[in-house]
């Protein structure tokens, strides 16, 4: 079930004349969500990374890409998502560990990503205490 929440990601595609081809709302969160980087592969799949969760809270944040819902394991966690060439969610992953409540500098953030010709995704960012990668 999609989360109707505080933040969401808007993504659009324009053609070479600057005309909108489509605009989508995805990555719906019950707290702040930030996209820090994105890239498009050779066939048009869109990859994005950033952070989601809740600052200064003991409640875990959620982020929904279609039917795939990620739940933060601490305050703020990293997300990595793949959308198809039409902006529809394909998959989403979360990374990060538990952080000390109310200590913002322990938060996890996906900051940069790159793609290679073999379809691999490389991501960098910051991790707080213990990193975990979960679907």
Image: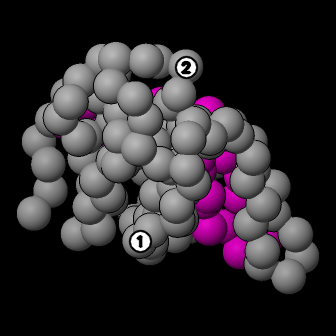
Magenta residues (range): 29-50
Q: What secondary structure prevails in the magenta region?
A: strand
Q: Which element type, helix, strand or loop, lies under badge 2?
A: helix
Magenta-drawn stretch contains 87: no
Q: Is residue 79 left or right of residue 114?
A: left
Q: Which element type, helix, strand or loop, lies under badge 1?
A: loop
Q: Position of residue 86 (x, y in %)?
A: 47, 64
Which quarter shows the C terminus? bottom left
Q: Residue at x 78, y 60 (%)?
A: 122
Q: Is residue 7 left or right of residue 46?
A: left
Residue 5 visible from this viewpoint = yes
Considering depth in this image, is 78 or 6 the residue closer to the camera? Answer: 78
Quickly name the residue at label 2: 105
The vertical placement of 102 against 128, above or below, is: above
Q: Is residue 80 left or right of residue 17?
A: left
> Residue furthest toward the right?
117
Q: Is residue 70 left or right of residue 43?
A: left
Quickly name the residue at label 1: 135
Near mark 2 (Cα within 10 A), the count class, few <14, some 14-19 or many ≥20, is few
Q: Residue at x 88, y 69 (%)?
A: 116
Q: Residue at x 11, y 42 (%)?
A: 4
Q: Position of residue 74 (x, y in %)?
A: 35, 40
The vertical placement of 55 against 35, above or below, is: above
């Amino acid at each position: 079930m999609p989360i109707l929440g505080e933040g969401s990601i808007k993504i659009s595609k324009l053609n070479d004349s600057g005309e909108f081809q489509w605009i989508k709302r995805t990555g719906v969160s019950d707290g702040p969500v930030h996209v820090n980087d994105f890239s498009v592969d050779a066939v048009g799949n869109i990859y994005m990374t950033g952070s989601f969760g809740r600052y200064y809270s003991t409640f875990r944040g959620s982020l929904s890409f279609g039917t795939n819902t990620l739940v933060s394991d601490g305050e703020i966690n990293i997300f990595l998502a793949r959308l198809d060439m039409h902006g529809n969610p394909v998959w989403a992953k979360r990374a990060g560990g538990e952080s000390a409540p109310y200590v913002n500098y322990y938060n996890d953030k996906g900051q940069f990503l790159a793609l290679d010709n073999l379809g691999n995704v490389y991501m960098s960012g910051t991790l707080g205490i213990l990193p975990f990668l979960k679907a």
